[in-house]
């Protein structure tokens, strides 16, 4: 049965009076929540005054509202209009902030794309785009993260996946035989069928992880991922790989290496990073294979989830805190056309 405004109104009229009143209260509560969230977004984005995102002018005045309830503005200098959501994660979306917040809560619960779509009243393709818009924004914010104090580092390895890029398996262009999604590589040991993901975590729980290269780790790979993210006078703890010696020297950090089989050396150990790796691999497993071109997004998602793991509320609040502060413009094409293996070195 197709639902129209008339059929929905008829269903509402058939409800008992108590249920009709409850429905009114729910709608009123959602409207109030939307107003509060729009006001929050405006206060955060214009904390230092209203600024035109097109020309940078401060000669800005209000200019009505959009259909979704967001405030519109117009610049007196360039004459262009904009809204609170211009150059933000919500740019171009017709959905209310309440729906976006609901989607964030679904993400914190690690719900599938289809489950998120059903809960938020959107389609599968929109659910996919929203997920990667959110994760790309978190990635931009994570680029400013640094680690300090005692830092533990090690590498994780993931099989390269061309999921969604079947063109790489057309005839002679194939790099390897196809395999089951989520399965291992076709070669034993460290090979170019694996991407190296250097990971590091400090004692405050801050972590950084990013694809660096194919195969075994190198000092150049470590420098690309951590080079400008290690605070002065930090101590780096790692296994005995010689790549860490050259890297630690280049960033002027003390290095403590835990050699074969030992896990503790005084107050230094690599137990936190080992635990981080286990949680990461367990968490990634339920996605049944992530395309390598999207892997960095999932690494950021995991880091944020582990840092604010106590509740979905903190996860949502942490994201809502940074959304208005980061200029952000991303199209569907930007998402789908990224390089299949985003290596740094």
Image (spheres, rainbow, N blue to C red):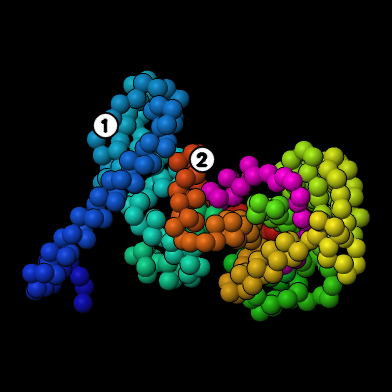
Residue beneath disc 2: 326
Please say if 301 is above or below 150.
below
For label 1, the crowd category at 10 Å Cα-Cα, with few meaning under 14, some 14 to 19 and many 20 or more, is some
At a point 50% along the width and 44% down the height, the residue shown is 322
Q: Which mark is residue 213?
A: none
Instruction: Give 263 or 206, whichever is nearer the viewer.
Output: 263
x, y percent for residue 256: 87, 53
Q: Which mark is residue 63?
A: 1
Which of the two discs, 1 and 2, labels the residue nearer the N terminus? 1
Left or right of residue 14: residue 194:
right
* The N terminus, quarter of image: bottom left
At a point 71% along the width and 71% down the height, the residue shown is 171
Q: Which residues are magenta?
A: 136-158
x, y percent for residue 48: 44, 27
For label 2, the crowd category at 10 Å Cα-Cα, with few meaning under 14, some 14 to 19 and many 20 or more, is some
Q: Is residue 212 visible?
A: no
x, y percent for residue 72: 30, 36
Left or right of residue 231: residue 165:
left
Q: Secondary structure at mark 1?
A: strand
Please say if 21 is above or below 46.
below
Q: Is residue 185 visible?
A: yes
């Amino acid at each position: 049965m197709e639902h129209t405004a008339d059929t929905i109104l008829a269903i509402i009229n058939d409800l008992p009076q108590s249920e009709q009143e409850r429905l009114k209260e729910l709608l009123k509560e959602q409207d109030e929540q939307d107003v509060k969230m729009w006001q929050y977004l405006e206060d955060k984005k214009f904390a230092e005054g209203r600024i035109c995102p097109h020309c940078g002018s401060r000669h800005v005045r209000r200019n009505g509202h959009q259909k979704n309830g967001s405030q519109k503005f117009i610049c007196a200098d360039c004459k262009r209009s904009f809204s609170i959501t211009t150059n933000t994660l919500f740019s171009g979306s017709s959905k209310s902030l309440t729906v976006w917040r609901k989607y964030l809560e679904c993400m914190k619960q690690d719900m599938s794309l289809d489950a998120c779509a059903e809960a938020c009243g959107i389609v599968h393709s929109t659910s996919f785009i929203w997920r990667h818009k959110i994760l790309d924004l978190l990635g931009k914010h994570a680029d400013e993260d640094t680690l300090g104090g005692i830092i533990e580092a090690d590498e994780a390895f993931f099989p390269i996946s061309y999921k969604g890029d079947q063109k790489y398996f057309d005839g002679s262009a194939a790099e390897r035989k196809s395999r089951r999604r989520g399965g291992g590589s076709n070669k034993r040991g460290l090979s170019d069928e694996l991407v190296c993901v250097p990971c590091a975590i400090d004692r405050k729980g801050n972590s950084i992880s990013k694809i660096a290269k194919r195969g075994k780790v190198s000092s150049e790979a470590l420098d690309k991922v951590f080079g400008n993210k290690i605070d002065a006078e930090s101590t780096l703890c790692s296994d005995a790989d010689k790549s860490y010696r050259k890297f630690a020297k280049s960033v002027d950090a003390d290095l403590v290496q835990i050699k074969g089989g030992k896990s503790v050396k005084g107050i230094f150990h690599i137990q936190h990073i080992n635990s981080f790796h286990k949680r990461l691999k367990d968490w990634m497993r339920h996605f049944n294979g992530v395309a390598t071109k999207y892997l960095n997004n999932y690494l950021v998602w995991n880091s944020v989830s582990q840092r604010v793991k106590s509740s979905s509320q903190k996860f949502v609040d942490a994201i809502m805190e940074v959304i208005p502060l980061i200029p952000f413009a991303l199209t569907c094409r930007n998402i789908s056309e990224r390089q299949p293996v985003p290596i740094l070195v």
